Image (cartoon, rainbow, N blue to C red):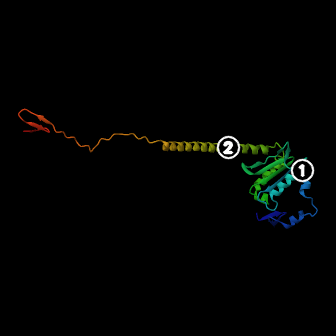
Amino acid sequence: MSSLTRGGKKSNWSSIEASVLSAFISTHSEPSINLLPDLLRQIPIVLFSGEYDLICNHWATENMLDGMTWNDKTGFNLGNGTVAPINPWIVEGETAGFIRYARNLTYILFHNAGHMVPYNQGRRSRAMLHQFIQLNLTHSNNQTMKNNNARVNPIMHRHFKHFILIVFTVIITVIALIGIIRLFTRQRQQSVIIIPCHSPNLFRLKQQTTMYTALSGGCVVLDGKISA
């Protein structure tokens, strides 16, 4: 968008306008931490930050909220030792950031956004505005929270099933490896049984015997031969 039509006149559009900035500057303005507690007693408020905003970084905003007291409690304390959970904020079926609610105050952290959240995430900013106008974000049992949880729970269940499958596979693999190692070790430890055997003496010489047998007629048998 290169220009805007205003009252029949075209004006160049720019992301930053010095005159607008100067109109909001007040040297005697109260800090928001002093104004928000009284406002939160009367109306719901939504605060949002971009995760890549370095001008008004979200760490400072979150630290301010953690230390601010409103509606008789400090920070996101819900009483009885519990604090408000940080839930994924789902927009159009995708995780758009994180959302947190306590006592009329809703805080949203936008993913993939810098200092100019509506410029970086236009559709998600509009979704936030529509939900807030309809008071869907600031009620403790609002439908937005229910929709977020309804979408997140199946995802968590699917991740848990994958985790169980991985653990089961690792256990089976470890058991199989232990069995193979034990079998290999047992085979190496088996003793070698030597069975003695008597080999025939291949070099045994035949024993030759000489037999002398007296025969009638004066003949002698010598080694099977007849000698006179």
Q: Residue at x 55, y 44 (%)?
A: 177
Q: Residues within 10 Å of mark 2 (few under 14, many from 20)?
A: few
Q: Is residue 218 found left or right of 90 in the rendered image?
A: left
What's the CA distance linking mark 1 and mark 2?
38 Å
- The tally of labels here is 2
Residue 55: x %, y % from top left: 81, 62
| Front position in the image: 85 or 167 | 167
Q: Is residue 48 found left or right of 176 in the rendered image?
A: right
Q: Where, by quadrant of the figure, is residue 125 drawn?
A: bottom right
Residue furthest toward the top?
A: 216
Tag of residue 153: none
Residue 33: x %, y % from top left: 89, 55
| Front position in the image: 84 or 203 | 203
Q: Residue at x 7, y 36 (%)?
A: 219
| Element class at badge 1 | strand
Residue 36: x %, y % from top left: 90, 53
Who comes first in sequence, dot 1 or dot 2? 1
Q: Which amino acid, mark 2?
A: Phe
Q: Where, by quadrant of the figure, is residue 1 drawn?
A: bottom right
The residue indicated by pointer 1 is 69
| Front position in the image: 23 or 217 | 217
| Element class at badge 2 | helix
Residue 212: x %, y % from top left: 13, 36
Q: Residue at x 90, y 58 (%)?
A: 31
Q: Which amino acid, mark 1?
A: Thr
Q: Quadrant of the C terminus?
A: top left
Q: Where, by quadrant of the figure, is residue 165 drawn?
A: top right
The residue indicated by pointer 2 is 160
